[in-house]
Amino acid sequence: MAYETIVVEVEDHIALVKLNRPDAMNALNNDLLGELADALTAAQSNDKVRCIVITGTEKFFAAGADIKMMSDKSFVDVFAGDLFTRETGAILRVRKPIIAAVCGYALGGGCELAMMCDFIIAGDNAKFGQPEINLGVIAGIGGTQRLTRFVGKSKAMDMNLTGRFMDAEEAERSGLVSRVVPCKKLMDEAMGAAAKIAEKSMISVMAVKEAVNRSYETPLAEGLLFERRVFNSLFATEDQAEGMSAFLEKREPQFRDR
Ligand code: DAK
């Protein structure tokens, strides 16, 4: 399907989604988030896709929700219209792993979109921030919640209250991103990580995603029980038998997602 605000390429089991509103620094509007939700839902049901990478340009991932689109909205517009809820819900329902590959600005909704992905790989020029306070509002899709879980209360307060940007080095130090590489090498690194994931059994890959995400929703004892039950259930799969046999036979496993 042809999109106007994103570009999607599927190759070697990886769906690469490029945000594509360069004139507005990939600011998020209903069109972009709608197309993104649609593309990710399609990737979820496409058997060829085993991992998804979302990226922007070398200068910006996304500079936030589109301020022009929001500026003349009323409370009733955003409340009754439930701004972005359907689209972000669809993104969060994707069970295949999603990597955010971020160079340049990831601000406001852009930072929140990156945090909705399963992990973030950053270029060394990345800048993360929740500057909504400068617009007289606050973050609306995770900037006060997910960011706090990633970097802790003190930094989350600092970022949300002052609106300052966090550079890539600080983001890695704080646990917001998993790796930092020179911006020019970002796509090689992200596609390499996606290719590694694509080699695994999709059953265990989706189980990992569910289990790690469960840790944000449950007390530790519940999360550990969930993990143990999922671990146990993977012994019902052919891929468990294959993975363990391959190790013992000193060969590469041939996973069949069964
Ligand atoms: N929206 C619309 N246009 C934007 C934009 C944005 N967020 N960010 C940049 N642009 C546009 C600029 O208007 C400019 O367009 P033209 O004037 O050329 O037409 C173009 O991109 C280039 O921007 P600059 O000229 O400003 O470029 P600079 O390099 O000087 O500065 C910058 C780059 C990223 C530092 C600066 O553009 C900037 O501060 N941008 C705004 C960042 C920001 O405030 N982001 C947060 C937006 S509020 C919710 C869901 C989501 C949200 C809230 C609620 N619910 C579900 C309840 C999210 C809110 C937000 O994200």
Image (spheres, helix red, strand yellow):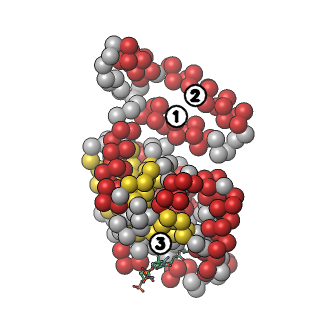
Q: Quadrant of residue 45?
A: top left
Decide if residue 97 is on the left or right side of residue 129: left
Mark 1 or mark 2, which has the lower sequence index? 1
Q: Provide the secondary structure element on which disc 3 rests.
A: loop
Packing grade of label 3 (10 A; few <14, some 14-19, many >=20) is many
Q: Provide the secondary structure element on which disc 1 rests.
A: helix
Disc number placed over residue 106 in the picture, else none: none
Q: Is residue 119 above or below residue 55?
A: above
Residue 244 on image: x %, y %: 42, 17
Can residue 9 be seen from the camera position used here?
A: yes
Can residue 79 be seen from the camera position used here?
A: no
Residue 51 on image: x %, y %: 39, 44
Q: Provide the secondary structure element on which disc 2 rests.
A: helix
Quadrant in which the C terminus appears: top left
Decide if residue 162 is on the left or right side of residue 15: right
Mark 3 or mark 2, which has the lower sequence index? 3
Q: CA distance from mark 1 to mark 2?
A: 7 Å
The residue pinned by badge 1 equals: 207
Q: Amino acid at mark 1?
A: Ala
Q: Which is nearer the eye, 178 or 86?
A: 178
Image marks 1 and 2: residues in contact by CB distance under 8 Å: yes
Residue 40 on image: x %, y %: 42, 53
Respond yes or no on whether mark 3 lies under 8 Å from ligand 1: yes
The residue pinned by badge 3 equals: 63
Q: Which residue corresponds to the image point at 31% horizontal and 23% vertical from the top-left?
A: 252
Disc number placed over residue 230 in the picture, else none: 2
Quadrant in which the N terminus appears: bottom left
Packing grade of label 1 (10 A; few <14, some 14-19, many >=20) is some
Mark 3 or mark 1, which has the lower sequence index? 3
Q: Quadrant of residue 180?
A: bottom left
Residue 200 on image: x %, y %: 39, 32
